[in-house]
């Protein structure tokens, strides 16, 4: 709930944003009663309901290839057909990929979201790192993209050589 605390005068309205973050796919709606404390007045209850449904991925899997500890960046194009700007906080479901925490797509425009794959583990032959990136949209819907990456062996940074030291005789 945002803002968590606020002040309004009598006969005024206030906008409260409630963000729903379900953790599992479930056919049963969630219903909560959130207590709103009113200073010098009776507490109010806010009834919320929501549902988590499986999201189908958009388009093809975005493929990456990089050596361990190196990176590759590609872009996901997000198109905003609404008449208001979208301020999006993408959710990346893996440490192997990263991108900006906040992303703006202006009204009736499109923008490229940079996604960087930086593997820290090699993939086995024929296997890939797989994950998803979810873009929650202001209208309550969202876009889900699949990403997959192949991580090759890291480049050797050289050979460490140290001259042998003569042994000292103990007495």
Image: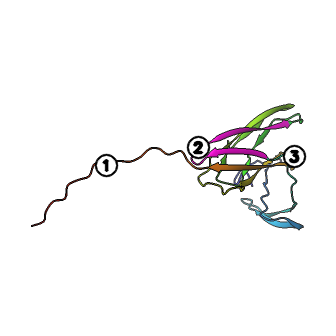
Q: Most prominent secondary structure in the magenta stretch?
A: strand
Position of residue 53 relative to residue 81, above or below, is below
Q: Is residue 47 left or right of residue 153?
A: right
Marking on residue 139: 3
- Colour scheme used in the picture? rainbow
Q: Depth check: give the residue in front, 158 or 45.
A: 158
Q: Image quadrant for the C terminus?
A: bottom left
Q: Where is residue 29? Give x, y as percent.
A: 89, 66
User: Dividing the picture into quarters, in which one does residue 42 lie?
Assistant: bottom right
Position of residue 120 relative to residue 48, above or below, is above
User: Dividing the picture into quarters, in which one does residue 158 lie?
Assistant: top left
The mark that comes first in sequence, 2 or 3, is: 2
User: For mark 1, what is the residue?
Assistant: 162
Answer yes or no: do the residues labelled 2 and 3 have beta carbons within 8 Å? no
Residue at the far bottom: name it.
28
Which of pointers 2 and 3 indicates the residue nearer the eye? 2
Q: Where is residue 104? Give x, y as percent.
A: 75, 36
Q: Image quadrant for the N terminus?
A: bottom right
Q: Is residue 50 left or right of residue 156?
A: right
What residue is rendered at 87% in x and 31% in y? 108
User: For mark 2, what is the residue?
Assistant: 70
SS category of the residue bearing label 3? loop
The mark that comes first in sequence, 2 or 1, is: 2
């Amino acid at each position: 709930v945002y803002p968590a605390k606020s002040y309004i005068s009598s006969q005024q309205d206030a906008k409260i944003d409630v963000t729903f973050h379900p953790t599992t796919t479930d056919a049963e709606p969630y219903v909560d009663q959130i207590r709103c404390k009113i200073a010098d007045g009776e507490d109010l209850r806010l009834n919320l309901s929501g549902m988590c449904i499986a999201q189908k991925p958009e388009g093809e899997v975005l493929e990456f290839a990089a050596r361990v500890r190196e990176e590759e960046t590609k872009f996901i194009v997000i198109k905003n057909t609404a008449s208001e700007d979208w301020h999006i906080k993408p959710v990346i479901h893996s440490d192997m990929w990263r991108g900006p925490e906040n992303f703006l797509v202006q009204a009736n425009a499109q923008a490229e979201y940079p996604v960087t794959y930086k593997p820290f583990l090699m993939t086995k032959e024929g296997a890939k790192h797989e994950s998803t990136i979810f873009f929650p949209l202001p209208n309550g819907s969202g876009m889900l993209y699949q990403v997959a990456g192949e991580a090759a062996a890291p480049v050797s940074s050289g050979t460490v050589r140290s001259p042998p030291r003569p042994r000292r005789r103990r007495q």
